[in-house]
């Protein structure tokens, strides 16, 4: 099934536009193809209508009837611990990280760049050491090098006697 999140009563959504941007709301009722009635009991969003293109649907859903009152929505919201689930979601963590990056000063960005540079140098050195070690023992490309001739020890080379070197005659 291609779609997982449907516009339905009880669906939790994030307001993406307007004065309530970033707030969590629950869809209470569908007005028509483009508008829904929403309520955000813990986010200080009063019951109001919003356009669907102002909402981003989340995976969370409350079990509430159509046109449920604010008390019913608030009780279902608190029983399902939507605020805690939202804070643990990857989506909320990305939004928080984006806001934190936007608050950085020039000096903070400089310190962050220096820390990343140091981390990358350490990581690169460790990677090169591992690659060098795996290249030596033959596991770099996933294969162990086999010694030629099986388990026989390699014969040692016999040194040849060296001949005395002839020197060129000295010029006068």
Image (cartoon, helix red, strand yellow):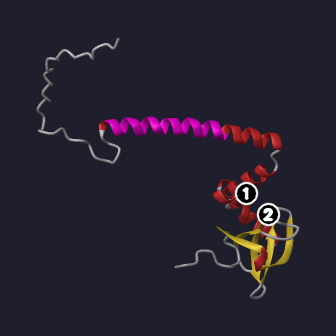
From where the camera sits, is residue 67 visible? no
- Residue located 78% across and 69% down the image: 16
The question of residue 47 being in magenta is answered with no
Q: Position of residue 104 (x, y in %)?
A: 80, 46
Residue at numbered disc 2: 22
| Spatial separation of the CA atoms under disc 2 and disc 1 | 9 Å
- Residue located 58% across and 78% down the image: 3
| Left-right relation of 81 to 163 | right
Q: Nearer the viewer, residue 159 or 120?
A: 159
Q: Position of residue 172 (x, y in %)?
A: 35, 11
Residue 155 location, quadrant:
top left
Say above or below: 148 vs 92: above
From where the camera sits, is residue 102 visible? yes
Say above or below: 126 vs 29: above
State the SS at label 1.
helix
Circles 2 and 1: CB atoms closer than 8 Å:
yes
Q: Residue furthest bottom?
A: 32
Q: Which residues are magenta?
A: 116-136
The question of residue 130 being in magenta is answered with yes
Which of the two labelled residues, at mark 2 and mark 1, occupies the earlier sequence position? 2
Residue 64 location, quadrant:
bottom right
- Residue located 69% across and 54% down the image: 93
- Residue located 41% across and 40% down the image: 131
Q: Position of residue 166 (x, y in %)?
A: 22, 17
Q: Nearer the viewer, residue 59 or 76?
A: 59
Residue at numbered disc 1: 95
Structural crowding at the residue carrying mark 1, measured as other residues with C-alpha within 10 Å and reported as few (<14), some (14–19) or many (≥20)? few
Say above or below: 153 vs 40: above
Residue 33 location, quadrant:
bottom right
Predominant secondary structure, magenta span: helix
């Amino acid at each position: 099934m291609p779609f997982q999140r449907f516009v339905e009563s009880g669906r939790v959504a994030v307001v993406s536009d307007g004065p309530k941007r970033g707030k969590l709301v629950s869809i209470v009722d569908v007005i028509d193809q483009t508008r829904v009635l929403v309520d955000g009991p813990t986010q200080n969003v009063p019951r109001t209508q919003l356009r669907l293109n102002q909402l981003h649907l989340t995976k969370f859903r409350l079990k509430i009837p159509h046109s449920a009152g604010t008390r019913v929505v608030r009780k279902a919201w608190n029983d399902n611990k939507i605020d805690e689930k939202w804070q643990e979601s990857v989506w909320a963590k990305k939004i928080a990280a984006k806001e934190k990056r936007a608050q950085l000063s020039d000096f903070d960005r400089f310190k962050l760049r220096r820390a990343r540079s140091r981390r990358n140098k350490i990581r690169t050195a460790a990677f090169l050491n591992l690659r060098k070690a795996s290249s030596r023992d033959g596991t770099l490309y996933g294969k162990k090098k086999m010694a030629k001739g099986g388990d026989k020890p390699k014969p040692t080379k016999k040194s040849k006697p060296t001949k005395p070197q002839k020197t060129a005659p000295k010029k006068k």
